[in-house]
Image (cartoon, rainbow, N blue to C red):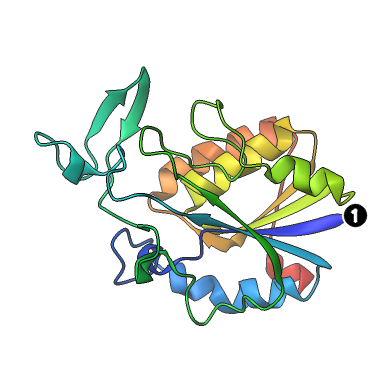
Amino acid sequence: MKALVIIDMQNDFMPGGALAVPGGDQIIPLVNKLQEKFELVIATQDWHPENHSSFADNHHDKENFDTTTIDGLEQTLWPVHCVQTTGGADFHPHMNAARIEAIFRKGTDPKIDSYSGFYDNAHKKSTGLSGYLKGKGITSLHFCGLAAEYCVSYSVLDALDEGFKVTLYEDATRALNEADFEKMKKQILDKGGRIKHAEELV
């Protein structure tokens, strides 16, 4: 069986949001169409506490997009975004959420960031997504959402490690940095993932 996984289609990642992905809103119609092709639709949601260590504002000597080391892991420092229960953390109002069966929240631990929908960046804690999908008999995962080179790609790589067959729809995602996304696509292909266009499916 197959499932669609929609990554972080939240207001703060849309144009005008706190951490806007260029053209992030342009993929919403395609994401909505994709949902019609899958019996099971899952979504992830960045869900940060205000004191999250990945926020530049929580480091007195740092600026947005600086890098630092936190507990031995290199960390990009982000603008404050997707804070729990705020409008910025909500899904974009034009995205159809009616068919989403379950939402898996990530980035809830203030001490560590979590790009992937499966694990935090140190792979210490699982969100439970893998077990949930396997319990449903899902063997094939199809990904779309934001941002391409971060939360989408890291989720795809973890899905491959978890033994799923994986397809990434590159026309149903957008990147903060296209060059970085190209590097991530190479990793995905090298691991056995597939990269396709959703327009061919819908």
Above/below status of 188 relative to 90:
above
Outermost residue to the top:
72
Give the camera-side residue of 21 and 112.
112
Q: Residues within 10 Å of mark 1 (few under 14, many from 20)?
A: few
Give the camera-side residue of 16 and 102.
102
The quadrant holding residue 171 is: bottom right
Q: Residue at x 27, y 40 (%)?
A: 77
The answer to whether one can see residue 170 in this image is yes
The answer to whether one can see residue 139 in this image is no
Residue 75 placed where, x, y %? 33, 31
Q: Is residue 160 left or right of residue 37?
A: left
Give the camera-side residue of 174 and 102.
102
The N terminus, quarter of image? bottom right
Q: Residue at x 10, y 36 (%)?
A: 60
Task: Give the labeled residue for mark 1.
Answer: 1
The C terminus, quarter of image? bottom right
The quadrant holding residue 199 is: bottom right
Q: Amino acid at mark 1?
A: Met
Residue 34 placed where, x, y %? 71, 71
Residue 51 placed where, x, y %? 27, 44
